[in-house]
Amino acid sequence: MSDNAGPKVFVTVPSYGHARYVEECLRSIFRQSLRPSKLLVIDDGSPDDSPAVIERVLAGCPFESELIVRENRGLAATLEQALSLSGGEYFAYLGSDDIWLPHMLREQTELLEARPDAALAYAHVYVIDENDNIVDRTDNWFPIPSNGILDDLLGGRIFSSPGVVYRRDILARYGWNTGSKLEDYELYLKLAADHELAGNPRVLAAWRRHGANTSDDVEAMLGEWIAAQDRAAAALGLGRDELDRIQGRLRFDTAAEFVRQGERRKAAELAIENWRHAGSARALLATAARLAAPPSLFRWNRQRKKTAAAGKYGDLKDLLA
């Protein structure tokens, strides 16, 4: 059961081209045990019938809601518009193909109430495919750090946006860079330079991973990570030498992701160019082993993990009840 006994949370859904998924997204917000003070959906020029689906679903919204439909401006500009129209103590957004588990807002605002120096609270999320199958969860590769998160962020280990709730007054002082394709990452770096970021070890949301995700374009993602670090370097107090070391390690580590994506030549180039930044002989040997392994091994391992996940994590619908 939802109630209003808690801090005011303004929620926005930036919608683009997810007519197939947006109803499920919105209904996961309706089911929150802590009701948002308002839900604002901004359709960013969807090429499908997302606006019609959203209008129909919002007709049954159990709290205040609004739909804005306009031309395409991009995600960061959409989030900036939503932030400018927001109120309340906290701000959260949910991508139009992602899902919140029922206690996401309550747990994250409780964490922020207990950690008054934190600019945001983040949590683990399930990774789901286009058919709502749970294929992974982020705590399998990203444990909540005990001594601050900045080193993880600089190393490309980034928490997922569906699990984030922001303290709105702090967020308003920073905002998103509308020129960035990985707008959240640059924001996280700048917030971490000045504030605590509070981690919740529980899984509170589901992030949908499919072919349209920016995260599947490894080369573009690496370029955006490095560009964001360059822009945030002054705020982080990083000189060029230190930044070169950090980015050399990031490039070396990303070689493993290129191998998983089947781009072995690019992986080899990165590993060879940046081997001095590997950090340890063990890391060098692990990357060499990945480069030597046949592609069929990675395909087999992906299928093995997907099959195991079906039995391990259960049905997403049961978690949303």
Image (cartoon, rainbow, N blue to C red):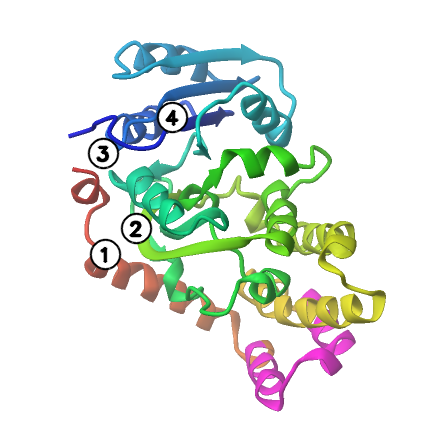
Q: Which of the marked residues, 4 or 1, is nearer the chain's N terminus?
A: 4
Image marks 2 and 1: residues in contact by CB distance under 8 Å: yes
Q: Residues within 10 Å of mark 2 (few under 14, many from 20)?
A: many
Cα gap from disc 4 to disc 1, whole angstroms: 23 Å
Magenta-span inclusion, residue 276: yes
Q: Which residue is mark 1?
A: 313
Cα gap from disc 4 to disc 2, whole angstroms: 18 Å
Q: Which of the marked residues, 4 or 2, is nearer the chain's N terminus?
A: 4
- Magenta residues, as a range? 266-290
Q: Residue 312 versus residue 238: which sits nearer the camera?
A: 238
Q: Which residue is mark 4?
A: 22
Three-letter amino acid code of the residue under disc 1: Tyr
Is residue 262 in view?
A: no
Cα gap from disc 2 to disc 3, whole angstroms: 23 Å
Q: Is residue 140 left or right of residue 120?
A: left
Magenta-span inclusion, residue 201: no
